[in-house]
């Protein structure tokens, strides 16, 4: 199964469209991307796209370029490789603060349905991992 991520450039915050003084969503950890981009003399967009492309399972990224110059800049992200240390730095700051869907729903399963519900066997990993319901 391939993965095609979207939103790689953090809603435009990595394009230079916004400055550090702009209101930035606190969930976006863009400062490490900017720091690495300055270290290797690449744009933050190129660093973010390169990081995503090096992740296992990624087949392509949706880049959303609207102009030829944006497309050219995005394609330059394929000209280099981030080091394992740089990849780790970006991995460390990008860990989600909460578990995303569908696992977030599983964590709140008993609030909506209850621990005594019977759950089909195909959901055994969730039932066992989160101690919800019984299998049938």
Image: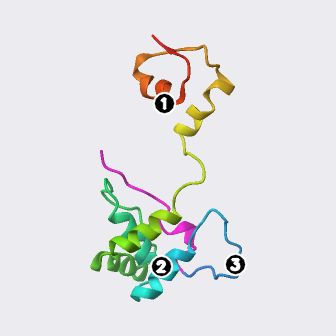
Q: CA distance from mark 3 to mark 1?
A: 41 Å
Q: Nearer the viewer, mark 2 or mark 1?
A: 1
x, y percent for residue 92: 49, 64
Q: CA distance from mark 2 to mark 1?
A: 38 Å
- Whether pointer 3 and pointer 1 mark residues with C-beta atoms closer than 8 Å, the reply is no
Look at the image and say whether residue 74 sits in the magenta stretch: no
**Residue to which mark 2 is pinned:** 44
**Residue to which mark 3 is pinned:** 22
Magenta stretch, residue numbers = 1-15
**Few, some or many residues within 10 Å of mark 3 (<14, 14–19, 20+):** few
Nearest the camera: 79 or 109?
109
The quarter of the rendered structure image containing the N terminus is top left
x, y percent for residue 117: 58, 14
**Residue to which mark 1 is pinned:** 129
Q: Secondary structure at mark 3?
A: loop
Q: Residue at x 59, y 34 (%)?
A: 107
x, y percent for residue 52: 39, 64
- Residue 106 location, quadrant: top right
Disc on the earlier residue, 2 or 1 = 2
Q: Is residue 136 left or right of residue 25?
A: left
**Few, some or many residues within 10 Å of mark 1 (<14, 14–19, 20+):** few
Q: CA distance from mark 3 to mark 2?
A: 16 Å
x, y percent for residue 50: 36, 71
Q: Residue at x 49, y 75 (%)?
A: 33
Disc on the earlier residue, 3 or 2 = 3
Relative height, residue 4 to residue 120 (above, below): below
Q: How is the image coloured?
A: rainbow
Disc on the earlier residue, 3 or 1 = 3
């Amino acid at each position: 199964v391939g993965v095609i991520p979207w939103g790689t450039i953090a809603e435009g915050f990595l394009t230079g469209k916004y400055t550090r003084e702009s209101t930035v969503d606190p969930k976006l950890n863009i400062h490490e991307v900017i720091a690495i981009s300055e270290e290797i003399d690449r744009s933050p967009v190129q660093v973010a796209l390169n990081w995503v492309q090096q992740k296992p399972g990624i087949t392509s990224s949706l880049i959303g370029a609207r102009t030829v110059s944006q497309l050219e800049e995005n394609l330059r992200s394929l000209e280099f490789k981030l080091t394992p240390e740089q990849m780790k730095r970006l991995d460390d700051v990008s860990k989600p603060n909460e578990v995303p869907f569908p696992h977030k729903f599983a964590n709140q399963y008993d609030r909506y349905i209850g621990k005594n519900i019977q759950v089909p066997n195909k959901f055994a990993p969730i039932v066992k991992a989160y101690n919800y319901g019984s299998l049938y």
